[in-house]
Image (spheres, helix red, strand yellow):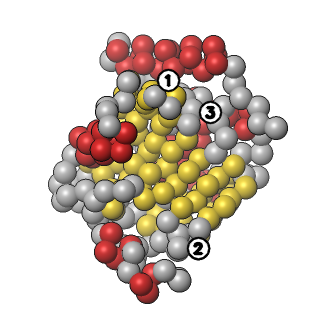
Amino acid sequence: MKVRRPFLLRWLWSIGVFCWFAAGCTPLWLPDRTAQPSLATQMEGWATFQAPFFSFAHPVDWKIEASEKGDYVALYPPDPSILGGDKIEIAWMGYEIAEGQDLQQWYEMHHRAAHGEAPLQLGTLSHQKMAEEDEKGVWQRLHVAIISELGAAQAVMLAHGHLVLSIGAYTHDPDMTATLAKIADSLQFAPDAPRTFGALHAPERSSP
Protein backbone atom coordinates (compact mmCIF):
# COMPACT_ATOMS: atom_id res chain seq x y z
CA MET A 1 0.00 0.00 0.00
CA LYS A 2 1.31 3.42 -0.89
CA VAL A 3 2.14 5.65 2.04
CA ARG A 4 1.69 9.32 1.28
CA ARG A 5 2.87 12.30 3.26
CA PRO A 6 -0.07 14.00 5.01
CA PHE A 7 -1.51 16.80 2.89
CA LEU A 8 -0.81 19.43 5.57
CA LEU A 9 2.91 18.61 5.65
CA ARG A 10 3.16 18.68 1.87
CA TRP A 11 1.30 21.98 1.76
CA LEU A 12 3.53 23.52 4.43
CA TRP A 13 6.65 22.36 2.58
CA SER A 14 5.40 23.87 -0.68
CA ILE A 15 4.69 27.18 1.04
CA GLY A 16 8.17 27.14 2.59
CA VAL A 17 9.85 26.54 -0.79
CA PHE A 18 8.06 29.41 -2.47
CA CYS A 19 8.66 31.75 0.47
CA TRP A 20 12.37 31.22 -0.19
CA PHE A 21 11.81 32.10 -3.85
CA ALA A 22 9.83 35.24 -2.97
CA ALA A 23 12.61 36.38 -0.63
CA GLY A 24 15.17 35.94 -3.38
CA CYS A 25 17.08 33.33 -1.37
CA THR A 26 18.53 29.98 -2.39
CA PRO A 27 17.20 26.97 -0.41
CA LEU A 28 19.86 25.55 1.87
CA TRP A 29 19.24 22.02 0.66
CA LEU A 30 20.31 22.67 -2.95
CA PRO A 31 23.35 20.51 -3.83
CA ASP A 32 26.83 21.91 -4.39
CA ARG A 33 27.43 22.15 -8.14
CA THR A 34 31.22 22.31 -8.09
CA ALA A 35 32.97 19.84 -10.37
CA GLN A 36 33.09 16.38 -8.79
CA PRO A 37 33.89 12.81 -9.83
CA SER A 38 30.99 10.72 -11.15
CA LEU A 39 28.48 9.93 -8.43
CA ALA A 40 28.54 6.21 -9.08
CA THR A 41 32.22 6.06 -8.12
CA GLN A 42 32.17 8.83 -5.54
CA MET A 43 29.16 7.74 -3.44
CA GLU A 44 28.85 4.44 -1.66
CA GLY A 45 25.56 2.75 -2.43
CA TRP A 46 25.19 4.21 -5.93
CA ALA A 47 25.36 2.33 -9.25
CA THR A 48 25.25 3.23 -12.95
CA PHE A 49 22.30 2.41 -15.24
CA GLN A 50 22.88 2.30 -18.99
CA ALA A 51 19.89 3.21 -21.16
CA PRO A 52 20.10 3.12 -24.98
CA PHE A 53 20.81 6.85 -25.31
CA PHE A 54 22.22 7.89 -21.92
CA SER A 55 23.56 6.62 -18.60
CA PHE A 56 23.11 7.91 -15.06
CA ALA A 57 23.92 7.09 -11.45
CA HIS A 58 21.22 6.05 -8.98
CA PRO A 59 20.86 4.64 -5.45
CA VAL A 60 21.66 0.96 -5.77
CA ASP A 61 18.56 -0.20 -3.86
CA TRP A 62 16.11 1.62 -6.14
CA LYS A 63 14.02 -0.42 -8.60
CA ILE A 64 14.35 0.62 -12.25
CA GLU A 65 11.89 0.05 -15.09
CA ALA A 66 12.80 1.14 -18.61
CA SER A 67 11.20 0.97 -22.04
CA GLU A 68 12.99 -0.98 -24.75
CA LYS A 69 13.29 2.14 -26.93
CA GLY A 70 14.99 4.09 -24.16
CA ASP A 71 12.43 6.90 -24.19
CA TYR A 72 11.18 6.32 -20.63
CA VAL A 73 12.79 5.23 -17.35
CA ALA A 74 11.12 5.06 -13.92
CA LEU A 75 13.04 4.77 -10.62
CA TYR A 76 11.25 3.59 -7.48
CA PRO A 77 12.71 4.13 -3.97
CA PRO A 78 12.47 1.14 -1.61
CA ASP A 79 10.20 3.12 0.73
CA PRO A 80 8.27 5.91 -1.05
CA SER A 81 7.22 7.46 2.25
CA ILE A 82 10.86 8.33 3.06
CA LEU A 83 11.31 10.69 0.12
CA GLY A 84 7.73 11.88 -0.15
CA GLY A 85 7.14 10.61 -3.68
CA ASP A 86 6.40 7.37 -5.48
CA LYS A 87 9.04 7.57 -8.21
CA ILE A 88 11.35 9.57 -10.43
CA GLU A 89 10.55 9.56 -14.14
CA ILE A 90 12.99 10.21 -16.98
CA ALA A 91 11.45 10.94 -20.37
CA TRP A 92 11.87 13.09 -23.49
CA MET A 93 9.67 16.19 -23.54
CA GLY A 94 7.08 16.47 -26.30
CA TYR A 95 8.44 19.51 -28.15
CA GLU A 96 11.77 20.39 -29.71
CA ILE A 97 13.77 23.38 -28.50
CA ALA A 98 15.29 25.79 -31.01
CA GLU A 99 19.01 26.46 -31.08
CA GLY A 100 19.86 29.11 -28.49
CA GLN A 101 16.29 29.25 -27.11
CA ASP A 102 15.95 29.98 -23.39
CA LEU A 103 14.97 26.73 -21.66
CA GLN A 104 12.82 28.36 -18.97
CA GLN A 105 10.77 30.29 -21.52
CA TRP A 106 10.51 27.11 -23.59
CA TYR A 107 9.30 25.15 -20.54
CA GLU A 108 6.60 27.71 -19.70
CA MET A 109 5.36 27.53 -23.32
CA HIS A 110 5.48 23.72 -23.17
CA HIS A 111 3.43 23.64 -19.93
CA ARG A 112 0.76 25.95 -21.34
CA ALA A 113 0.53 23.86 -24.52
CA ALA A 114 0.20 20.62 -22.54
CA HIS A 115 -2.13 21.85 -19.77
CA GLY A 116 -3.87 24.86 -21.26
CA GLU A 117 -2.49 27.26 -18.67
CA ALA A 118 0.67 28.26 -16.82
CA PRO A 119 1.48 26.57 -13.46
CA LEU A 120 -0.24 28.07 -10.42
CA GLN A 121 3.23 28.61 -8.95
CA LEU A 122 6.66 28.15 -10.52
CA GLY A 123 10.06 28.52 -8.86
CA THR A 124 13.44 28.18 -10.51
CA LEU A 125 15.89 26.20 -8.38
CA SER A 126 18.73 26.49 -10.89
CA HIS A 127 19.30 27.40 -14.53
CA GLN A 128 22.58 27.00 -16.40
CA LYS A 129 23.01 27.99 -20.06
CA MET A 130 26.39 26.92 -21.39
CA ALA A 131 28.30 28.74 -24.11
CA GLU A 132 28.66 25.35 -25.80
CA GLU A 133 27.66 21.76 -25.18
CA ASP A 134 29.50 20.29 -22.19
CA GLU A 135 31.28 16.94 -21.95
CA LYS A 136 28.01 15.24 -20.94
CA GLY A 137 26.17 16.41 -24.07
CA VAL A 138 24.15 19.15 -22.33
CA TRP A 139 23.98 22.79 -23.46
CA GLN A 140 21.31 24.01 -21.05
CA ARG A 141 20.00 22.80 -17.67
CA LEU A 142 16.89 23.91 -15.76
CA HIS A 143 15.55 22.76 -12.38
CA VAL A 144 12.04 23.97 -11.53
CA ALA A 145 9.51 23.31 -8.77
CA ILE A 146 5.85 23.91 -9.58
CA ILE A 147 2.39 23.69 -8.12
CA SER A 148 -0.29 23.01 -10.72
CA GLU A 149 -3.83 21.68 -10.77
CA LEU A 150 -2.27 18.22 -10.36
CA GLY A 151 -0.33 19.19 -7.21
CA ALA A 152 3.35 19.64 -6.40
CA ALA A 153 6.03 18.55 -8.84
CA GLN A 154 9.59 19.31 -9.86
CA ALA A 155 11.87 18.47 -12.76
CA VAL A 156 15.40 18.89 -14.01
CA MET A 157 15.43 19.43 -17.78
CA LEU A 158 18.53 18.81 -19.89
CA ALA A 159 18.75 20.23 -23.41
CA HIS A 160 20.59 17.94 -25.83
CA GLY A 161 20.56 19.12 -29.42
CA HIS A 162 16.93 20.04 -30.14
CA LEU A 163 15.60 17.54 -27.58
CA VAL A 164 14.89 18.08 -23.89
CA LEU A 165 15.13 15.21 -21.39
CA SER A 166 13.09 15.61 -18.20
CA ILE A 167 13.98 14.02 -14.84
CA GLY A 168 10.99 14.64 -12.59
CA ALA A 169 9.13 13.72 -9.42
CA TYR A 170 5.71 14.59 -8.00
CA THR A 171 6.90 16.04 -4.72
CA HIS A 172 8.82 18.98 -3.21
CA ASP A 173 10.38 16.82 -0.50
CA PRO A 174 13.95 18.11 0.10
CA ASP A 175 15.54 14.64 0.18
CA MET A 176 13.89 13.76 -3.13
CA THR A 177 15.03 17.11 -4.53
CA ALA A 178 18.66 16.36 -3.61
CA THR A 179 18.43 12.83 -5.07
CA LEU A 180 16.79 14.13 -8.25
CA ALA A 181 19.55 16.72 -8.71
CA LYS A 182 22.31 14.14 -8.16
CA ILE A 183 20.82 11.81 -10.75
CA ALA A 184 20.55 14.70 -13.21
CA ASP A 185 24.12 15.81 -12.50
CA SER A 186 25.39 12.32 -13.28
CA LEU A 187 23.50 11.84 -16.55
CA GLN A 188 25.73 11.38 -19.60
CA PHE A 189 24.35 11.33 -23.15
CA ALA A 190 25.80 8.72 -25.51
CA PRO A 191 27.86 10.05 -28.46
CA ASP A 192 25.19 8.75 -30.88
CA ALA A 193 22.19 9.91 -28.83
CA PRO A 194 19.47 11.48 -31.03
CA ARG A 195 19.30 15.27 -31.22
CA THR A 196 15.96 15.68 -33.02
CA PHE A 197 12.56 13.99 -32.94
CA GLY A 198 13.22 12.67 -36.42
CA ALA A 199 16.34 10.88 -35.21
CA LEU A 200 14.66 9.75 -31.96
CA HIS A 201 11.76 8.10 -33.78
CA ALA A 202 13.67 6.82 -36.80
CA PRO A 203 12.71 3.20 -37.68
CA GLU A 204 16.21 1.86 -37.02
CA ARG A 205 16.03 3.20 -33.43
CA SER A 206 12.81 1.33 -32.59
CA SER A 207 14.75 -1.83 -31.75
CA PRO A 208 18.17 -0.81 -30.36
Mark seen at residue 28: 1
Quadrant of the rendered image containing residue 96: bottom left
Q: Quadrant of the N terminus?
A: top right
User: Is there CB contact under 8 Å for labels 1 and 3?
Assistant: no
Mark seen at residue 68: 2
Q: Within 10 Å of the Cα at label 1, are there few (<14), some (14-19), or many (20+) other Cα atoms?
A: few
Residue tagged by mark 3? 175
Q: Within 10 Å of the Cα at label 3, are there few (<14), some (14-19), or many (20+) other Cα atoms?
A: some
Q: CA distance from mark 1 to mark 3?
A: 12 Å
Write the residue at 43% across / 59% down.
92
The three-letter code of the residue at mark 2 reads Glu
Instruction: From the image, state whether disc 2 or disc 3 is nearer to you.
Output: 2
Disc 1 on helix, strand or loop?
loop
Q: Nearer the viewer, residue 27 or 11?
A: 11
> In this rendering, would 5 be left or right of 35?
right
The three-letter code of the residue at mark 1 reads Leu
Residue 15: % across, % down:
49, 15
Write the residue at 39% across / 75% down.
201
> In this rendering, would 11 be left or right of 106?
right
Disc 2 on helix, strand or loop?
loop
Quadrant of the rendered image containing residue 137: bottom left
Instruction: From the image, state whether disc 1 or disc 3 is nearer to you.
Output: 3
Tell which circle, 1 or 2, labels the residue nearer the N-terminal end: 1
Residue 161: % across, % down:
29, 65
Residue 107: % across, % down:
31, 43
